[in-house]
Image: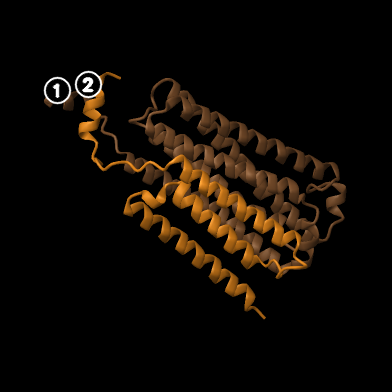
Amino acid sequence: MAEYLMVNSGHNRDDQASKLGMWLFLFTELLLFGGLFLVYSVYRYMNQEAFLQASLHLNIAMGTVNTAVLLTSSLTVAMSVSAMQKGNIKVSINLLILTLLFACTFLVIKYFEWSAKIGHGLFPGMEHYNMLEPGEKLFFFLYYFMTGLHGLHVIIGGIFIGIVIRKIKTGKVRPDRYILLENAGLYWHLVDIIWIFLFPLFYLIH
Amino acid sequence: MSKQENEATRVLDDDPKEQHITSFGNLVGIWVGLLLLTVVTVLISVLHKNFIAFSVVTALVIASTKALAVINHFMHLKYDSRVLKVMVYIVFGVFTVLIVLTALDYFTRA
């Protein structure tokens, strides 16, 4: 027994605390996006007609597909954690790779959406944008800022998952030590939750 | 890492409770529910002339339902320790109060 304690001294792990720390970080993310949602709600209340007109420029089909893509990627991460808990390392890695593919799909669709709009001169500073009403300008400014910030989170989440895949392969994350995988999953689900609110507020207001 | 070291980690692990594993079937069920709610939101919005007006409230109620399902099942909160649950619910509660108070402020301005 004493020998065991020596081997582990200084390396006591506390998965509960790791998870709690991750949640604390997620709360700061909630406040970051929550503040932006508050700004959006107030400006929308003050410019109802303009926000409605501007939202008609957004492509509902693309938004819906992206929602489905993100929800599915959340499913594959959650399944990956379950697979790891059951000891199926191979399945766990494959599900994470699938998640990364969905993340790329999301970003590619986002790229097409943005470039279509920028192609029509609808970006702050461009000709078409400058001719819009102040309320519509606000809508597009918030659209680019919030979906852009969300896209950045998708990229960061993807990198996080990539790191976890590496660590599973090198044996640092394994069925008896998988809190990093769980935390990467928590981050990814938060990115999904933010999109769950962004989608109806920007695309579906009529 | 050696087998001996593994055992040592287990001995010192301060949470010996059995870990709950969500089954694939359960997760897929939640996913189907989330997709259905998405379809409902989009349909209400696109066919809004035949339905009740798609208000912010409808959107937020459906979105919150989806978020709760993600938090409880995908994020595993339903099976997590009480500390985490209390923390998450308090933070989300405070955040809701913040939104509601700001909304009341703007809606009641002359």
Q: Position of residue A13 (x, y in %)?
A: 29, 34
Mark 2, Cα crowd under 10 Å, few <14 / some 14-19 / many 20+, is few
Image side of residue B21 versus residue A163, left or right: left
For residue A159, what is the image quadrant? top right
Task: Count the labels in the image.
Answer: 2
Which amino acid is tagged 1? Glu
Q: Is residue A73 above or below residue A37?
A: above
Residue for point 32% across, 54% down: B82
Front residue of B105/A179: it is A179
Tag on residue B70?
none
Q: Position of residue A33 (x, y in %)?
A: 57, 53
Q: Which chain is disc 2 placed on?
A: B
Front residue of A205/B48: it is B48
Q: Give the chain letter for brown.
A: A
Q: Which residue is mark 2?
A: B4
Q: Is residue B96 above or below residue A146?
A: below
Check the image and name the residue furthest to the front. B25
Which amino acid is tagged 2? Gln
For residue A112, what is the image quadrant? top right
Q: Which chain is disc 1 placed on?
A: A
**Disc 2 element:** helix
Front residue of B60/B103: it is B60
Marks 2 and 1: which is nearer the front?
2
Residue B47 appearing in the image? yes
Q: Which tint was used for chain B?
A: orange
Q: Position of residue B76 (x, y in %)?
A: 42, 47
Image side of residue A30 versus residue A60, left or right: left
Q: Position of residue A197 (x, y in %)?
A: 61, 55
Q: Which residue is mark 1?
A: A3
Residue for point 47% across, 59% down: B92
For residue A17, what is the image quadrant? top left
Mark 1, Cα crowd under 10 Å, few <14 / some 14-19 / many 20+, is few
